[in-house]
Image: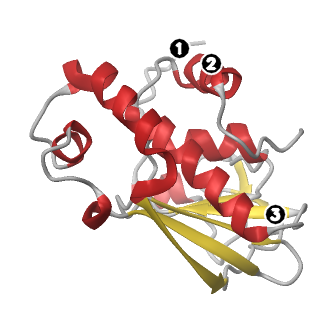
Amino acid sequence: MPRIKKVNEDILKKLEAFHGALVPGLIIGAYMVELAYDMLGDADLVDAAVESKKCIADSVQIMTGCTLGNGWLTVYDWGIFAITLFDKRGKDGVRVHLDTKKMPKESLTYKWFFRKVGKGSHDEVNKELLVFKKSILTYEFVKVNIKKEKSAKIMTCVKCAYPFPYDGSAECKSCRQGSYYINNNFH
């Protein structure tokens, strides 16, 4: 998958199609990716980390090719508008975050971020973000310390008989922690 390093109308359309709507978090995420690539220079083999499971993760997936499925994207559900792109080998990277100190307090973007205006203002916030671009972002150079999980041996759960990655227990996590569904015995 090609790396998309600059925000333009085409990428905004791709983000909208992937996410289902063009929302402020996608635009912020897109500019975060652009800034991170600007600062990384020639790094071509990157992994990514995001600190929110919200919209910015979709921008990272579309623009970098780092996805949950290929294992190149790590998501921390911290609710922070921040991403890190880093070299796969050396682990040197750039962390970019939304910097509310750089936002005019009277701006719609500031009010949107602090939930003082609703979703009905998205179009106007989006217009503002396309003017702000990277000016409301801050970056820092970082060394990443993400440990990738090794592939575990596959076992069969003693309770439900489903195969699962062995983690030291004879039961799968679903049986130990409680499943997200109730089996109605449909066949």
Report the front residue among 48 and 168. 48
Q: Which residue is mark 1?
A: 186
Question: Could you say which disc has been placed on residue 134 in the image?
Answer: none
Residue 166 position (above or below residue 110): below
Say which quadrant the N terminus sits in. Answer: top right
Residue 174 position (above or below residue 111): below
Task: Specify the farthest residue to the left.
Answer: 116
Q: Which residue is mark 3?
A: 46
The x and y percentages for residue 36 are 66, 62
Q: How is the image coloured?
A: secondary structure
- Helix, strand or loop at mark 3: strand
> Is there CB contact under 8 Å for labels 2 and 3?
no
Q: Which residue is mark 2?
A: 13
On the picture, is 65 further left or further right than 107?
right
Amino acid beneath label 3: Val
On the picture, is 125 further left or further right than 106?
right
Q: Distance from label 2 to label 3 (Cα)?
A: 24 Å
Amino acid beneath label 2: Lys
Task: Specify the farthest residue to the top.
Answer: 187
Q: How many marks?
A: 3
Say which quadrant the C terminus sits in. Answer: top right
